[in-house]
Amino acid sequence: MRIILIGFMGSGKTTIAKALAHDLGFKFIDIDAEVEKSEQKTIANIFEVNGEEYFRKIETNELKKLIDKKFIVVASGGGTPCSESNIEFIKNNFTSVFLNVDSEQLLTRLKKKGNKRPLIIESKNIDNTVLALLQKRMIFYNQADIIIDIIDSNTKTVVNEIMSKL
């Protein structure tokens, strides 16, 4: 079994995926960490030096490398499923879980951590940038096998809800 958590930046994919992997006895893999390891650069640096298109290519390569692994829980990047080829690959090879966090909660979270996020670091209006990007990505996120509406951000509660739906 391969499980992948998808959702917007700041939705808690890494935190929830680590806890879910622990509870299932699976290996945890973070796509962003794999990209940084393979490129030996931070994501911010990859965006700055090579651009988003290059980053997405590396991200897709790292996603596809997971096909040989079993018993994993993957934290995807926020944009990982947001192309036709990636969402199809995910649908065909993973049980996907969309962590659906409402836009107000996302904005609150991202404003605390905004300086680390390449797609919003340069934004003059974080609210508009986030809302536009979120709207564009929802068509991909909503194709997940399981959708978890995050109301209570308690990790254990979210993990238990995911496990009950697997």
Image (tube, rainbow, N blue to C red):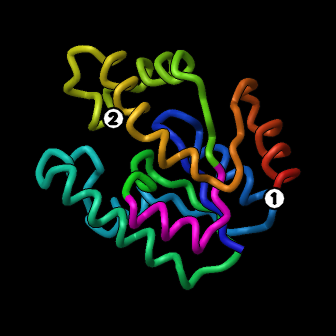
- Count residues near mark 2 (Cα–Cα under 10 Å), then give few for <14, some for 14-19, many for 20+: some
Viewed as shown, does residue 89 lie left or right of 93? left
Give the residue drawn at x 68%, y 56%.
145
Secondary structure of the magenta portion, mostly? helix
Where residue 140 sits in the image (x, y, percent)?
A: 48, 49
Q: Of callouts 2 and 1, which one flags the residue occurring earlier in the amino acid sequence?
A: 2
- Amino acid type indicated by mark 1: Leu
Give the residue drawn at x 48%, y 61%.
87
Nearest to the observer: residue 7 or residue 20? 7
Where residue 137 sits in the image (x, y, percent)?
A: 42, 41
Q: Most extreme residue toward the left, as rendered?
A: 49
Give the residue drawn at x 39%, y 61%.
84
> Mark 2 or mark 1: which is in front?
1
- For marks 2 and 1, give the CA distance: 31 Å
Asked which secondary structure carries label 2, the reply is: loop
Viewed as shown, does residue 152 lie left or right of 160? left
Q: Any mark on residue 117, and which?
A: 2
Give the residue drawn at x 35%, y 72%.
61
Q: Most extreme residue toward the bottom, as rendered?
A: 68
Q: Which residues are magenta?
A: 84-97
Q: Any mark on residue 166, and which?
A: 1
Quadrant for the N terminus, please: bottom right
Residue 150 vs 125, above or below: the answer is: below
Q: Any mark on residue 34, and which?
A: none
Where residue 70 sits in the image (x, y, percent)?
A: 66, 79
Quadrant for the C terminus, please: bottom right
Viewed as shown, does residue 112 lie left or right of 55? right
Nearest to the observer: residue 95 or residue 36? 95
Asked which secondary structure carries label 1, the reply is: loop
Q: Does the magenta segment cover residue 86?
A: yes
